[in-house]
Image (cartoon, rainbow, N blue to C red):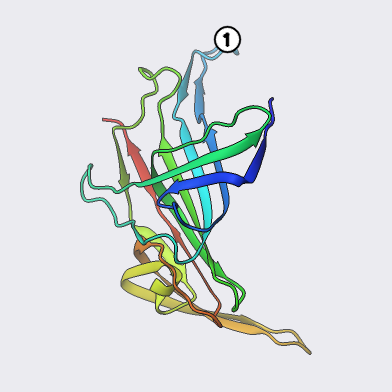
Amino acid sequence: MATSIIIGFGTIVGGIFAGACATNVSWGYNPNVQRLYCLGTTTPWASIEKPTETMSVTVYQGSVASQDVSPSTGCDDITSVSASVSPSSCGSTVEGVSGQWYITSYGYNKGDPNVPGQETWSLQRWVEGTSPSLSPAPNYVIRNISEGQSSESSAATTGLVFTGTILSGNQGSVAAGATGQATTTYYGTVTSVGGASLGGGETATSSASVQLTPLWV
């Protein structure tokens, strides 16, 4: 396996992340192979692929606009986002990735009151297999209801927009001879993610999970 060294100073992240202060990016491919066997042989009768590509980008808050993750009401109304990475490398050439992606999760963390929080975006898309006639990309991708949680009642400051009923619960812990911490977490369905804007002197976290279903019709 050829290994290349990727240089962070020369790697560019684009699309909705263009102009953002990105701190980390990763990308990958999974063939998702299902092998079909017959009795009397260990050789697969057929191999079915449903390949996916993934990307994860972490940026400092305030540099990526809020993105819609509301559920689908038809086959064609799901929104995708543009994202790309152009790596700078030593050794073997490293190909970048670009195009349209679907958001699968979002996370926000501001653990230091004096440092801006960071948003982590996870993206995915389905692509054709090695034999497109047998393993085509899906015709449609639909989105189910997205669930999220935030440590702030005004969840928009942590990058979430709740809709409908919001539930809440308390957590806390303390040890003898020390100080502890208590927090309230808010739970609900989410219609958009991104655009966190929590100010200095505060700490908070949030996360959202987006359920996608590919359709071949």
Dot 1 crowding, Cα within 10 Å, few <14, some 14–19, many 20+: few
Going by the picture, which residue comes out furthest to the bottom? 177
Which of the pair 53/57 is nearer the observer?
57
170 sits left or right of 50 in the view:
right
Residue 124 in the image: state x and y as whole percent: 44, 43
Which residue is identified by label 1?
A: 40
Q: Please tell me which residue is depicted at 44% across the width and 68% down the height of the picture.
A: 196
- Examine the rendered structure and indicate whether residue 94 appears above or below residue 108: above
Quadrant the C terminus occupies: top left
Residue 213 in the image: state x and y as whole percent: 35, 43
- Examine the rendered structure and indicate whether residue 63 appears above or below residue 24: below
Task: Count the numbered circles shown.
Answer: 1
186 sits left or right of 28 in the view:
left
Going by the picture, which residue comes out furthest to the right? 177
- Examine the rendered structure and indicate whether residue 194 appears above or below residue 181: above
Q: Please tell me which residue is depicted at 45% across the width and 22% down the height of the picture.
A: 48
Residue 43 in the image: state x and y as whole percent: 57, 12
Which of the pair 74/168 is nearer the observer?
74
- Which SS class for mark 1? loop
Q: Please tell me which residue is depicted at 65% across the width and 39% down the height of the picture.
A: 6
Quadrant the N terminus occupies: top right
197 sits left or right of 140 in the view:
right
- Examine the rendered structure and indicate whether residue 125 appears above or below residue 23: above
Which amino acid does the dot numbered 1 rest on? Gly
Going by the picture, which residue comes out furthest to the top? 40
Task: Tell me which corner region of the image, top left, top right, bottom left or bottom right, holds residue 113.
Answer: bottom right
Which of the pair 78/35 is nearer the observer?
78
Q: Please tell me which residue is depicted at 39% across the width and 23% down the height of the picture.
A: 135
Which of the pair 7/120 is nearer the observer?
7
Residue 164 in the image: state x and y as whole percent: 29, 71
